[in-house]
């Protein structure tokens, strides 16, 4: 759908039914697909024809929904994965092999940090982490001969730092590698990283895109802008023949679809992290209201952040939409309509105050989750980061008293009343 607004894309992009076909995206709950001749099917296995043969690789329901997300991000092609973790792993592993290196922002989701710093290191892929606020010179110094990708998060979970996408894109491109941005928190409704120079965008669709805490999922969108052949020696997987598909070369055969085709044909085939069509259907229902919900999440996030900032028992509030936040100007540039509904703050009473405060909350539930319709909160020190002592927590940028609250779609006045009574 060209020349329509993001709202219209949220509702209608991706699936365009023909005459007499279902209005809602059909759930194609089938592992396999039938063909009249082995010759027909053989063409699919050679990537000579487009079509479906096994849902471990591709499924029509998933492809409708991936097409919607790709359109929303302004990308050339997209695919769904079983989780956000799978999306980030695939996006990186599609172009990195043993002996390669990644430059990543240090301010990223803990699961992604672990994936890159520990698990991918076991595969022989090393990484250098840089502060999202490093100077262009410091960023430049992080690159090596074997660097194959740069990675960051638009708004980091849970630190709520904002990535200077243009700075990271310029550095990546100066070194002949793509920038991959995890755009989970703002969603394409509030930021389209490709417009600022990102090459590949990833999502945990588990969060706002689904928006109801219903289904785990992920997505990868490729802009189609990165010129793999111009850096052919760095990306042999895309620029030299793939013997497992009779010697096709992705970058020359598939053009702007090369990255996603390779990721589907090789990584989905071999790892099978596909999303179930049922989950893709639920995700699509979430996407249909994403533009309306994101606006409300931001309104509630800002109202809660302003309330907390003015409260005497609150020591500090992190929310890029607050004028006092160090990321305010950057957020305004990249996300003029607001970012997301997640706010983090510390109480003057530290860890103990955080515990008793959270126990008293009536509307906001204690959950590991973020970014859905129901307000929830978490004290990382007593949950996700509980193996760390106070010193280690401080070093990780997650002080013991830090509380992350994900403002849902309830009435702001009720959320504030709940916080007021719990703080009293
Ligand atoms: C949750 C999250 C992930 C991981 O996604 P899952 O769907 O839980 O696998 C990755 N990146 C960010 C920014 C997240 O918030």
Image: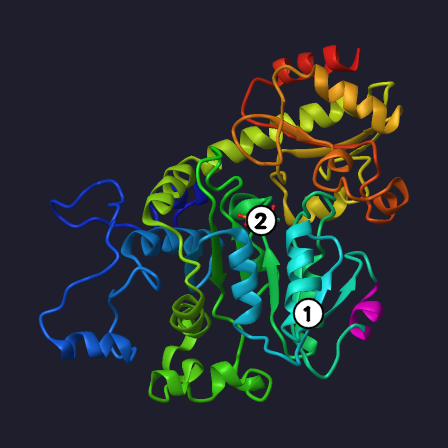
Disc number for residue 56:
none
In terms of image quadrants, where is residue 287?
top left
Whether 117 is drawn above or below 287: the answer is: below
> Which residues lie in the magenta part?
135-141
Callout 1 secondary element: helix
Where is residue 259 drawn, in percent x and y?
A: 46, 72
Callout 2 secondary element: loop
In terms of image quadrants, where is residue 376?
top right
State whether residue 322 appears in this view.
no
State whether residue 416 appears in this view.
yes
**Residue named by callout 2:** 191
**Residue named by callout 1:** 121
| Residue drawn at x 87%, y 44% as measured from the top left | 394
Give the spatial CA distance, label 1 vs label 2: 31 Å
Q: What count of labels does the image hold?
A: 2
* Viewer-proximal residue among 265 and 273: 273
* Viewer-proximal residue among 56 and 23: 56
In terms of image quadrants, where is residue 173?
bottom right
- The crowding category of the residue bearing disc 2, from other C-alpha atoms within 10 Å (few below 14, some 14 to 19, many at least 20), is many
| Residue drawn at x 52%, y 65% as measured from the top left | 90
Where is residue 225 drawn, in percent x and y?
A: 51, 71
The quarter of the image holding the C terminus is top right
Magenta part, dominant SS: helix
The outermost residue toward the left is: 36
| Residue drawn at x 84%, y 68% as measured from the top left | 138
């Amino acid at each position: 759908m060209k020349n329509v607004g993001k709202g219209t894309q949220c509702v209608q992009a991706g699936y365009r039914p023909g005459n007499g076909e279902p209005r809602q995206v059909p759930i194609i709950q089938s592992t396999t697909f039938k063909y009249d001749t082995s010759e027909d099917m053989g063409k699919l296995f050679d990537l000579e024809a487009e079509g479906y043969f096994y849902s471990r690789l591709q499924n029509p329901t998933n492809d409708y929904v991936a097409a919607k997300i790709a359109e929303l991000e302004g990308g050339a092609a997209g695919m769904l994965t079983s989780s956000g973790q799978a999306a980030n792993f695939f996006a990186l592993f599609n172009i990195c092999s043993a002996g390669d290196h990644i430059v990543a922002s240090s301010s990223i989701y803990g699961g992604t940090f672990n994936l890159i710093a520990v698990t991918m290191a076991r595969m022989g892929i090393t990484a250098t982490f840089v502060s999202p606020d490093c100077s262009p010179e410091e960023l430049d110094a992080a690159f090596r001969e074997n660097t194959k990708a740069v990675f960051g998060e638009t708004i980091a979970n849970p630190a709520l730092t904002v990535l200077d996408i243009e700075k990271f894109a310029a550095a990546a491109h100066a070194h002949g590698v793509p920038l991959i941005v995890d755009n989970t928190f703002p969603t394409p409704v509030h930021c389209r990283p490709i417009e600022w120079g990102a090459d590949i965008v990833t999502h945990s669709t588990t969060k706002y895109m689904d928006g109801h805490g219903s289904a785990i999922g992920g997505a990868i969108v490729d802009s189609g802008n990165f010129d793999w052949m111009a850096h052919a020696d760095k990306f042999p997987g895309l620029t030299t023949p793939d013997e497992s598909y009779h010697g096709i070369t992705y970058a020359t055969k598939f053009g702007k679809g090369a990255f996603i085709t390779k990721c589907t044909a090789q990584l989905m085939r071999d790892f099978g992290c596909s999303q179930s069509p049922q989950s893709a259907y639920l995700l699509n229902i979430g996407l249909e209201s994403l533009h309306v919900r994101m606006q409300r999440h931001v309104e509630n996030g800002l109202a809660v952040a302003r309330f907390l900032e003015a409260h005497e028992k609150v020591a500090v509030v992190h929310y890029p939409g607050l004028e006092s936040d160090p990321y305010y100007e950057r957020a305004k540039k990249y996300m003029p309509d607001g970012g997301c509904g997640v706010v983090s703050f510390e109480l003057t009473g530290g860890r103990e105050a955080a515990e008793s405060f959270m126990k008293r909350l009536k509307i906001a539930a204690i959950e590991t989750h973020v970014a859905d319709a129901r307000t929830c909160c978490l004290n990382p020190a007593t949950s996700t980061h509980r193996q760390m002592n106070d010193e280690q927590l401080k070093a990780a940028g997650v002080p013991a008293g830090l509380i992350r609250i994900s403002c849902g779609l309830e009435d702001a006045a009720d959320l504030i009343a709940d916080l007021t009574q719990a703080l009293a």
